[in-house]
Amino acid sequence: MTMKTSNESAANQKDESTEISKKDLNRLFWRSFQMEFSWNYERQASLGYVYAMIPILKKLYKKKEDLSQALKRHLEFFNCTPYIVTMILGISVAMEKQNADNSKFDSSSINTVKASLMGPLSGIGDSFFWGTLRLIATGVGTSLALKGNILGPILFFLIFNIPHIALRYILTSLGYKMGTGFLKKLQDNGTMGYLTLGAAILGLMVIGGMSSEMIVLNVPLKIGTGKSATAVQDILNGIMPGLLPLAAFGIIYWLLGKQWKTTTILLGIGVVSILGAWAGIFG
């Protein structure tokens, strides 16, 4: 009887040691402000993301191997409007806790959910903060500053940052609470697999749309002379619009699969683009 009580006490102590507290979420909130300080072209905001997660990951994973895997997991590519990133951070914390508590949890779904949320939340965040709130703050601040009023820069700072900081704080707890309850239900009824698959499909659709819109590549060469000359680009567009951007994306994806360094690929893109434009192959 005494042995059973000791085991129960040890189990309860273990559960308490991995319980996410309000203090942990507040620490996550404050660390999220570093999101853009270490931004880079290879993985963008990944270093800031993993920096915010470190204290909680250390609390959840006592084994060095488990902690190492979690840190590597969050060093993958990540980019999102920094003012609402705490919602994704909160969901990641909830999923990491599920992973730490349940050995059957699919840890790959953590990054899949992160990737699926980046695009939609960035669209909302960019539209509201960059496209609306910043313009309002600039209009109020500039009108006063042009008159020599010291309130101009002060009001710009307050109008832009008070809503941003308040929303960032609220979304930290909201993301965690939503993730804790919602993801547990998905795990229990077996829907997590469908969510992972759907998120992966959504991520591929976003990548496809970005490659079509953001990769600009055309060939100004013409076949024939005079008015009867046919542009090579028109022929390619007739075969399939966006064929060249798709081919460029495919080559880069293949090179990444061959473990080429991102810096080498970027330098190669620059060299090929300059030489192609100089030779008249690329427009």
Image: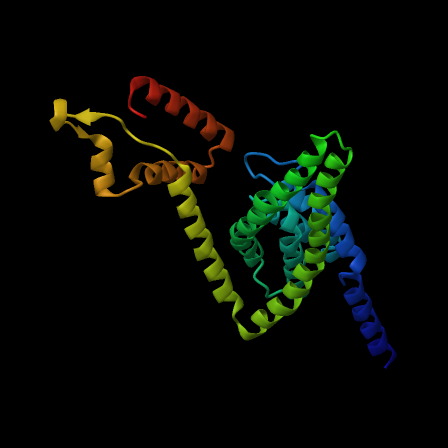
Which residue is found at the position 39% from the left and 21% from the top?
274
Q: Is residue 205 left or right of residue 163?
A: left
Left or right: residue 193 compared with residue 49: left
Residue toward you, 264 or 171:
171
Of residues 88 and 60, the one drawn nearer to the viewer in this rendering: 88
Tell me what residue is drawn at x 28 percent, y 29 percent. Answer: 219
Q: Position of residue 210 (x, y in %)?
A: 43, 44
Q: Is residue 146 above or below residue 124?
A: above
Q: Relative to 167, is 180 above or below? A: below
Is residue 43 found left or right of 138 in the rendered image? left
Is residue 63 in sight in this rendering? no
Q: Where, quadrant-wise, is the C terminus in this rendering?
A: top left
Residue reaching furthest bottom? 1
Q: Residue at x 79, y 70 (%)?
A: 11
Residue drawn at point x = 58 percent, y = 56 percent: 110
Give the residue at the far front of this rendering: 147
Q: Position of residue 189 (x, y in %)?
A: 55, 75
Q: Is residue 99 above or below residue 139?
A: below
Tell me residue 136's x, y (percent).
Answer: 63, 43
In the picture, the quarter occupied by the N terminus is: bottom right
Judge whether 104 appears above or below 33 on screen.
below
The image position of residue 170, as x and y in percent, is 71, 57
Q: Is residue 183 visible?
A: yes
* Res. 234 image quadrant: top left
